[in-house]
Image: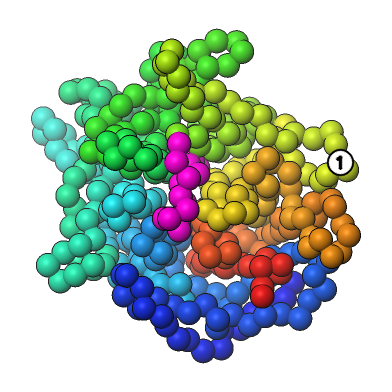
Amino acid sequence: MLLLGLVGLSSCEDYLGNKTDLDFIEVPEVDYRQVAYVPILPVLDDFDRPVDVCIGFDELIYVVDEATEEVIAMDEAGRIIGRKFIPGAKSVAQDRRFDLLVIGRTDTVIQGNSVSFASIYRLRLIGNSGYGLNNATVVNKIVHPFYAKSSFSTGDKQVEFNRIAVIADANAARNNRYYVTRTGPATNSLNPDDAIVWFDNNDKWISNISVNTSSGLFRDYFEDPNGITTLAQPPQLTAQTGGDFIFTSLDETNALKVQYIEFNESEFGAEFRPRILASGGDTSQADGFINTPGRFTQPYDVTVAGDASNFIFVVDAETDSLYQFTATGLEGVLPPAATGITKYQKSSFGGTGTGITQFKQPRAVAYFNQIVYVADEGNGRILRFKLTTDFD
């Protein structure tokens, strides 16, 4: 793989302030028939256990360090510009109002007993001193299970929120609703802890998602769900609307651990249905497919590109790898037309190690401005990659 240096920084004016000019990334000399993701240096290693990374609609990079229980903000050059302590912080997302939604914990005392519950903190980034994570205040908090009921059981203390995905909608009343993956011990088929939970833009519980299949309606469709993404990704002006989402499952018995769920509305009502993406067979188009049974082992996270490529990215903590697919589930990238190659060329990579194209328990993936970001938890760093064909 090729190494890219950082050679100087400049900035241009943006509506949120000074933004980094990414012309500092050197263009490598490559054979463009060799489609590959190449690393961008320096490695961002000012972290202990980075377990999540997301790109905000404010075009900043947000990282959750589980060791310090902090959300950390960076600009595109990787400079840390703010941080905020949230108890038990493990994941972060940003809605299109620029509020951060942070998954953490709430410790409290009930009837003389100390208890801890999974929680979602809403952080408003605009304060008296201006915009930024250092000025953020908590303006609301969701605590499990009290968004849906007034009492709790012993099992509720073991429930975890995992990831959040924000929904875009042209209707302002429905814009900024969001999904949350949830896991826990209760396996009741009517109301299991393993679920994808749906909240409105005021943090009010709508429902747990039920999925319609050819075999019927399932309230317990999701098994150990972890990563989740909608198609609404920065840049904000090109964010796609709709309730479709892709989720990952860590359940060992689940053969399809990355699935696309589509949301359909009609005069007869609304429903969620699975959409099967490419699963194999026609190797004239590609050699790998996202819905091949058993393709993934521990896919902790998934995201989609918010640009015209519509790529899907998955990180697997067991194989220590980053996988890239088209929107239809074909693995790889189509080389430039001038090459005459019409088959998608594999660009997924990884393997266990400390090299800059290797990972140790990658936990999250994000994408913005043609750059892929990976939270490499075991190595305490954020790695960045860019496709050879994306250089001018």
- Residue 337, compared with residue 277, is above or below; it is below
Image point (61%, 37%), residue name = 258
Q: How is the image coloured?
A: rainbow
Image point (43%, 12%), residue name = 268
Residue 366 part of the magenta-drawn span: no
* Residue 19: image location, x then y, percent: 40, 76
Residue with the most extreme bottom position: 8
Image-based side of 28 in relation to 121, left or right:
right
Q: Can residue 65 be seen in the rendering of this structure?
A: no
User: Which span is picked out in magenta?
Assistant: 226-242
* Residue 224: image location, x then y, percent: 50, 32
- Residue 389, compared with residue 361, is above or below; it is below
Q: Residues within 10 Å of mark 1 (few under 14, many from 20)?
A: few
Q: Amino acid at mark 1?
A: Thr
Picture quadrant where residue 204 is located: top left
Return the residue nearer the eye: 178 or 236: 236
Q: Quadrant of the N terminus?
A: bottom right
Image-based side of 337 in relation to 154, left or right:
right
What SS does tag 1 mark?
A: loop
* Residue 226: image location, x then y, percent: 49, 39
Image-based side of 31 in relation to 128, left or right:
right
Q: Quadrant of the C terminus?
A: bottom right
The residue where tag 1 is placed is 283
Residue with the most extreme top position: 216
Return the residue nearer the eye: 374 or 51: 374
- Residue 200, compared with residue 305, is above or below; it is above
Picture quadrant where residue 107 is located: top left
Image-based side of 33 in relation to 19, left or right:
right
Image point (24%, 60%), residue name = 125
* Residue 132: image location, x then y, percent: 26, 67
Image point (27%, 65%), residue name = 133
